[in-house]
Image: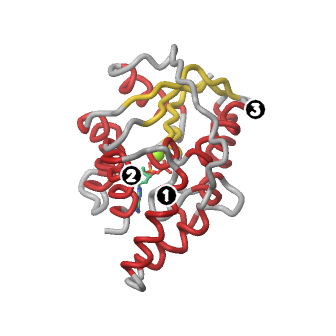
Amino acid sequence: MASALVIFKPDAAHRLAVRDALWAWLREERGWKLSGLTWYRPPAELIQSHYDFLQGRPFFPWLVDFMTALPVLVGRVEAEPAGLDSMRYELGETRIAESRPGSLRERFGIWGGINCLHLSDSPASGDKETQLWGRYLDLTHGSATLEPAGERPDHTFHLRSLFNQVAARSHTELATQEATKLLNAETDLTGDGFGALCRILLGAIG
Ligand code: DAT
Ligand code: MG
């Protein structure tokens, strides 16, 4: 069996309808077993180590801000290597514009690297990542309870269209305002937390 680290990134952890959908997928446990899911806000040093192979890339400062600005949901899955491969296949490719139609990232990711879920990409990286994160929190006894999204909408495709407009510098201000309104309808974050969510998501555009 291989261990893998799973993280609901801030977009997935705080957009409630998206969180529900991803949680429903993870809970299916088709060939994998989930142990623990914990709310945790990672410090920058942890994210810098976790993504050390990306240091120096132009999006790296954004990536660290994205992953440290809000609490995320972290857990561990156990799977046969082939089971882990099929989970990664269902997850889809890294960048949303390139994610396979029907994959989780194509369905729920907003733009660029705002791609909702982290999942270790091999047994070797799973070992490394669960060991690293295990130094900061207990990955086996998570007891996060997830409130159901209730009537919260999922505006993924509309948000993707608006983010594309912001990226193309077309109606930048209006598209930003409209995206902020839609995000507000999707999340229960308020005040500084909501401000942080908007900053890290729109910050992906650079
Ligand atoms: P994955 O998450 O599919 O395993 P990765 O490990 O190569 O992808 O990269 C880690 C994260 O870094 C990824 O989920 C989002 C961000 N990232 C990687 N390449 C990117 C790019 N070209 N543009 C924006 N964000 C990127
Ligand atoms: Mg990876």
Q: Earlier in the sequence, mark 1 or mark 3?
A: 3
Provide the secondary structure element on which disc 3 rests.
loop
Ligand 1 within 8 Å, label 3 CB: no
**On the rendered image, what quadrant is the N terminus found in?**
top right
Looking at the rendered structure, the secondary structure element under dot 2 is helix
State the image coordinates of residue 161 (x, y, percent, origin top left): 54, 74
Figure check: 198 above or below 18:
below
Residue type (three-letter) at the residue carrying disc 2 = Leu
Kindly identify which residue carries mark 1. Answer: 183
Residue at the (26%, 51%) spot, across then down = 55
The residue labelled by disc 2 is 197
Position of 83 with respect to 164 (left or right) is right
Q: Mark 1 to mark 3: distance in Å?
A: 31 Å
Residue 62 — which label? none
Is the Cβ of the residue at disc 1 closer than 8 Å to that at disc 2?
Answer: yes
Residue that badge 3 annotates:
30
Q: Give whichever of discs 1 and 2 has the lower sequence position.
A: 1
Q: Position of residue 86 (x, y in %)?
A: 69, 42
CA separation in Å, label 1 and label 2:
9 Å
